[in-house]
Image (cartoon, helix red, strand yellow):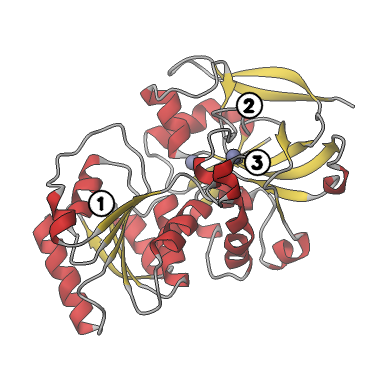
Amino acid sequence: MSITAYRWLMNGVNEPLTRQEFAAEPAAGEVVVEVAGCGVCHTDLGFYYDGVRTNSQLPLALGHEISGRVVAAGAGAEKWQGKAVIIPAVIPCGECDLCKRGKGTICRSQKMPGNDIQGGFASHIVVPTRGLCPVDEKRLAAAGLQLADVSVVADAVTTPYQAVYQAQVTPGSLAIVIGVGGVGGYCVQMAGAFGAAVVAIDIDSDKLKTIAEYGAALTLNARELDGRAMKKAISAFAKENGLPTTEWFIFECSGTKPGQESAYGLMVHGATLSVVGFTMDKVEVRLSNLMAFHARALGNWGCLPDHYPAALDLVLEGRVELKSFIEQKPLAEINEVFAAVHEQKMQRRAILVP
Ligand SMILES: [Zn+2]
Ligand SMILES: [Zn+2]
């Protein structure tokens, strides 16, 4: 059974996105998901404005933060029919050696919607069932959320989950998050949910004000303090509150050169520096600081689908707040919304709704 569907295609860097109709049909092991919402991510803008290459050739529908409902199922996928789901932003193959060793985020046969395959800025998307995260709609309603709202769990929430989990943030530790819009805002909440006292750093005082209400114990404006002053302020905060002055967990979520430089500069003995944001810009650092501080630097690409249910639980339990950080917009306005996000005219993460 094929379904008449449409998607918004990227044709070239900064060229208008155009609407294309297509027939959505699931092969064996695949489902057609009717998109409830698809979040607009920094990564989409990187493809669209900065010329970061997509793995699949253009034209391609972008969008990898997708929630929706299964409306058609291929052979072997029947049990998903009718279910509300979140589609992982990175879908590992599940069969290679890396996947079998639990390293699906680096699977070389992985599929990322809006990069390797057609993405979620569409009425429907065809995806494999592997890694789909079921959404309990009763709990969703009880939490005052719509299915479109939890689209951001697919990346903005789960990516920091993976970063915080992998860094082994423990209760009583001190975490620092640089860049608290989008992913970073959830990173603050996630580190808090894992028991850390969290310092939030940004250059936008409105974002700092918001995040102070949702888990940041200390906020610092990087426009007002240089690197040295920031480190001093955090050390003083740690001492006052009986928090460690070593082994800080630093999460760089701004995806900017100044943010990455600040993050590196905040390293202390035994620090863990997690690079969560992405930029094409290069930074100059003294790599030997890692050696001298016996510190470590970690990256992470997306999040293992195995972690999605736990991350979604934190949202449904109200331990990670979504509502104050998202805003639904009609998918038909995708060109205008991209421009607004690019020009930083939107305070909240945009979710495009077909
Ligand atoms: Zn993303
Ligand atoms: Zn694999």
Q: Which residue bears the numbered disc 3?
A: 95
Please identify, in this view, whether the residue under mark 1 or under mark 2 is nearer the observer.
Answer: 2
Q: Is 200 situated above or below 108?
A: below
Q: Is 302 situated above or below 50?
A: below
Q: Which residue bears the numbered disc 2?
A: 118
User: Considering the numbered disc 2 on the image, is that residue within a helix, a strand or a loop?
Assistant: loop
> Which of these two is toward me, 173 or 319?
173
Contact check, label 3 and label 2, Cβ < 8 Å: no
Which amino acid is tagged 3?
Glu
User: Considering the numbered disc 1 on the image, is that residue within a helix, a strand or a loop?
Assistant: loop
Q: Which residue bears the numbered disc 1?
A: 203
Which comes sooner in the sequence, label 3 or label 1?
3
The N terminus lies in quadrant = top right
| Marks 1 and 2, how far apart at CA | 35 Å
Q: Residues within 10 Å of mark 3 (few under 14, many from 20)?
A: few
> Which mark, residue 53?
none
